[in-house]
Amino acid sequence: MHVISRKRLREAAAIHADLQSPLATWFRIAKKAQWNSLAEIRQTFPSADAVEGYTVFNIKGNEYRLITRINYRTGRIFIRGVLTHAEYDRGSWEK
């Protein structure tokens, strides 16, 4: 898969230092993956969930949410944002 853009992952890790390693691990796995569906993603990330057209990953033991839009046909993952659990629960990212 092609992750667009890693810059958002780096920015999130700069804000939340404890995210650097978990996001690097997620990126390494995602760029080597060849996912064709949410079911395939869940083989690697069982807690991944579809939410209103986005695929949401729990990062660092459910402390953070990585919000993505995945185009399975083109093999691209677009990073929408990385939020704390509390920020995600407020729902402002959906607008």
Image (cartoon, rainbow, N blue to C red):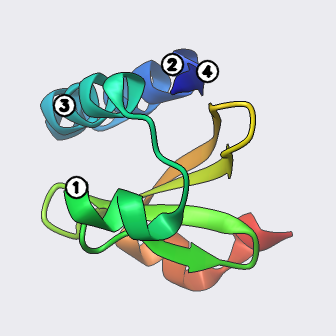
Q: Is residue 31 above or below residue 38?
A: above
Q: How many residues crowd mark 1 within 10 Å: few (<14), some (14–19), many (20+)? A: few
Q: CA distance from mark 3 to mark 1?
A: 12 Å
Q: CA distance from mark 3 to mark 4?
A: 15 Å
Task: Please name the residue that numbered disc 3 is placed on.
Answer: 25
Q: Is residue 84 left or right of residue 25?
A: right
Q: Which mark is residue 74?
A: none
Q: Which mark is residue 44?
A: 1
The amino acid on which the numbered mark 4 sits, given as a three-letter code, is Ser
Name the image quarter holding residue 24.
top left
Q: Which mark is residue 6?
A: 2
Residue in view at x 66 percent, y 80 percent: 91
Q: Secondary structure at mark 2?
A: helix
Mark 2 touches mark 3? (CB < 8 Å): no
Mark 1 touches mark 4? (CB < 8 Å): no
**Quadrant location of the C terminus?**
bottom right
Between 33 and 15, the residue placed more toward the observer is: 33
Which sits earlier in the primary sequence, circle 2 or circle 1? 2
Position of residue 93 measured from the top left corner of the image (x, y, whole percent): 71, 65
Name the image quarter holding residue 53.
bottom right
Which sits earlier in the primary sequence, circle 2 or circle 3? 2
Q: How many residues crowd mark 3 within 10 Å: few (<14), some (14–19), many (20+)? A: few
Which sits earlier in the primary sequence, circle 3 or circle 4? 4
Mark 4 touches mark 2? (CB < 8 Å): yes
Q: CA distance from mark 4 to mark 2?
A: 4 Å
Name the image quarter holding residue 18.
top left
For discs 3 and 1, the disc positioned in front in the rendered view? 1
Task: Please name the residue that numbered disc 4 is placed on.
Answer: 5
Q: Is residue 69 above or below residue 87?
A: above
